[in-house]
Image (cartoon, grey):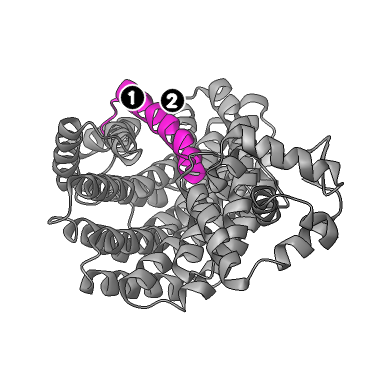
Amino acid sequence: MDASLARLTPTAREVLHWASVLTPRLDPGLLGRVTDLDAGRIGEALEAAERLQLLHAGERGLGFCDERIARRVHDGISPARRQLMHRHVAELLARDKALDLEHAADLAHHAQLSGDPYLATRAMVTAGRLCLRFFANEEALRLAYKGSAMAERLSGARRICLMLELREVMLSAAPLEDWEATAGELVTLAEQALEHGALAHARLGYHLASHVRWAHGQWADAREEALQSERVTRSADDSEQIVAMAETAKCLAMLERDLEQAREMLADAWALAAQRRLSHPALPMAQGLLAWHGNRVDEADARFKEARTLCKASGDRLGEFQANEYLMMMDVEHDRFDAAQSRCRLLVELGGKLRDGSEAPFALAARGLCHYALTDDATLLAEALDPLRAADAKHRLSWMLNRAARLDLQRNRPAAAITHAREALAHAQALERATGQLLAHHVLAQAHRVTGDAAAHQYHAAAVAALEQAPVARWAWQRAADLLDDREAEEES
């Protein structure tokens, strides 16, 4: 082979060196970019290498005739120059807008061989996010762990910021082994980012911590960290302020906390976004949640669909699932079970491709709920509830149990309604979520009336009335209106 290389012109040898660096995916277009040679000279070099049986054009495109040839050519480049060459390729790939898994693999490969720990770690973040877009969760997690090891070679703000971005990839790729420790670590990293003046990453850290705590029922802490994520960006640039205000408003709406503050914050975010012509999925998502809470159904439907589109376009698969989830929930609340069942098919498909969190169990339970509503067969729902319980998603489980209890009651199964509503109530109380509590008390009051337990009926009817000043969704109050009217009539008589 050495004799064959000697027969090549210096230009052809240079092209062959770059070809060995680009192997195993030898893209002629990228070869032209890294060599800065025109197509004619590259063509001549490749033709000469092909005549000497060093390269060949096969079904998979251009490549070396033998992997051993590629390795020997690559090893013949000095180590320092090899690193610089891989770095140049990685930098070009990092600027590309290509969205595919091969691009992610190439970027990670060349960045690792660049000898630059910052570039390599940055590439692991980019490649990990690309993998998440295409549901390659295991590969995303592998890259994030590899990036975390590389980040340890960095210091200061660069290390902290990249660690936060890698944690974001990890959270989207797989469930947490120790969510409390992770939430604490995220807050620590956010504080460190704040000390270094990295406001955008401080916001990210608090936001991620808030999300982790929300998912596991620590709603008071989730609220505080959501508010902190907004506070730290008040002196940041407009784009960061918009994201922070929208994400915080969304969190408060999901928590049913400080709803007036959420509305004001979201209005400011929309105004600033309009001025800067910026968009972010959290804007319509937060607006949809607040509209649904206020029973403005058409507005909520439009906003959730907008959020779904933005999430899908940006590769935010968890956000896409959540937007579809709320659309399905709205259909269920309005007894549109045929429409809800259609949405469940998408949720099941999407949930099955996501991390092993509560998304897939919830999607299967929602499908079972719709099947129960349409066929009076609760078997699928009963089978799906235990996996949802095991996923420890109290907010999703409480919602599902309340809707199951309502169906039980409609089908004259008061004992099953009481069992489901009691469990729903326990979760809603643990979460301090007023709407869930009201719906559970409402079903329990009605079910105990059917069974003839007057004392239990009065207890739960009084509990509904006691939530009058709580931030209960308007549509839920409408559902409980019959019970409140009966209670007022009893008091007057």
Residue 196 is drawn in which quadrant?
Answer: bottom left
Q: Amino acid at mark 1?
A: Val
Q: Which residues are magenta?
A: 294-323
Q: Residue at x 28, y 31 (%)?
A: 291
The residue that disc 2 covers is: 334
Residue 133 shown left or right of residue 212 in the figure: right
Name the spot of residue 129 as percent of width and height, x first.
51, 51
Q: Residue at x 85, y 41 (%)?
A: 51
The residue that disc 1 covers is: 297
Magenta span contains residue 186: no
Q: Residue at x 41, y 27 (%)?
A: 305
Name the spot of residue 187 as percent of width and height, x first.
33, 71
- Which mark, residue 323? none
Q: Residues within 10 Å of mark 1 (few under 14, many from 20)?
A: some
The answer to whether residue 175 is visible is no
The answer to whether residue 107 is visible is yes
Q: Residue at x 28, y 75 (%)?
A: 192
Q: Secondary structure at mark 2?
A: loop
Of residues 70 and 450, the one nearer the viewer is: 70
Name the spot of residue 93 as percent of width and height, x first.
52, 48
- The secondary structure that dominates the magenta segment is helix
Q: Residues within 10 Å of mark 2 (few under 14, many from 20)?
A: few
Q: Nearer the viewer, mark 2 or mark 1?
A: 1
